Image: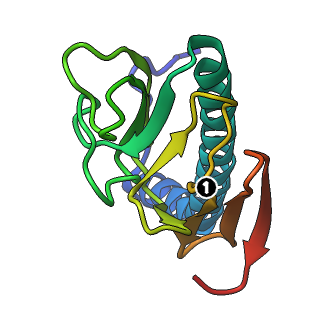
């Protein structure tokens, strides 16, 4: 009895295997992207809610204004860069900018891949301001809009008392 030590796949077997794998990948890829987009949507919601609560707490504890603003470099405020990330800081001089003597409370990178994030406040400020006296976002109520081409759009509403809720949108 002779055993062949050099067993190999034929070219036909290899071609069929590659064809089956390519079909499986083609079918699975859209579902993978949808799953990742849903995960991004849930993550951004949790990040925003947690940081809003953190801002309210720090404003009340430290008796100073706390600002939440979009940031590209996680060190300074930059308008309309919410899809890159945002920072939270104690704003002792109330200029809505992070200065050298002010404490950075939180940095959150969002790095959105499947959607965009925008803030639209009632007074048209590009940042949120939580007041020193009570921690409420007086004058900073408004909504975050998460718009995606893959999953449902979402609106996160921040009311005058600093409470948040989300609703799904049909268009952005």
Mark 1 crowdedness (10 Å alpha carbons): few <14, some 14-19, many ≥20? few
Q: Residue at x 57, y 38 (%)?
A: 130
Q: Can you say whether 17 is above or below 146 in the image?
A: above
Q: Is residue 148 left or right of residue 79?
A: right
Q: How many marks?
A: 1
Colouring rule applied to residues: rainbow
Q: Is residue 134 left or right of residue 89?
A: right
Q: Which residue has dot 1 on it?
A: 32
Q: Is residue 6 left or right of residue 153?
A: left
Q: Quadrant of the C terminus?
A: bottom right
Q: Is residue 99 left or right of residue 114?
A: left
Instruction: Tell me if I can see residue 161 in this picture.
Output: yes
Residue in the foreground of this view, choosing between 18 and 75: 75
Q: Quadrant of residue 157?
A: bottom right
Q: Can you say whether 75 is above or below 151 in the image?
A: above
Q: Residue at x 33, y 41 (%)?
A: 96
Instruction: Tell me if I can see residue 23 in this picture.
Output: no
Residue in the foreground of this view, choosing between 74 and 88: 88
Q: Quadrant of residue 150?
A: bottom right
Helix, strand or loop at label 1? It is helix
Q: Residue at x 23, y 35 (%)?
A: 76
Q: Quadrant of the N terminus?
A: top right
Q: Residue at x 50, y 48 (%)?
A: 128
Which residue lies most toward the bottom here? 171
Q: Position of residue 64 (x, y in %)?
A: 50, 22
Q: Position of residue 107 (x, y in %)?
A: 41, 26
Q: Position of residue 13 (x, y in %)?
A: 49, 53
Q: Position of residue 9 (x, y in %)?
A: 44, 42
């Amino acid at each position: 009895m002779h055993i062949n030590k050099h067993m190999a796949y034929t070219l036909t077997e290899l071609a069929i295997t590659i064809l089956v794998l390519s079909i499986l990948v083609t079918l699975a890829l859209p579902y993978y992207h949808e799953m990742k987009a849903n995960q991004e949507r849930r993550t951004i919601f949790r990040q925003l809610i947690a940081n809003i609560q953190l801002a309210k707490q720090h404003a009340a504890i430290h008796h100073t204004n706390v600002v939440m603003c979009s940031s590209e470099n996680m060190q300074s405020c930059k308008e309309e860069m919410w899809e890159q990330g945002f920072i939270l800081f104690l704003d002792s001089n109330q200029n809505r900018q992070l200065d050298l003597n002010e404490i950075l409370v939180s940095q959150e990178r969002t790095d959105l891949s499947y959607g965009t994030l925008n803030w639209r406040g009632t007074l048209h400020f590009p940042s949120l301001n939580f007041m020193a006296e009570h921690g409420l976002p007086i004058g900073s109520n408004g909504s975050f809009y998460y718009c995606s081409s893959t999953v449902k759009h979402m609106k996160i509403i921040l009311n005058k008392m600093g409470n948040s809720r989300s609703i799904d949108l049909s268009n952005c």
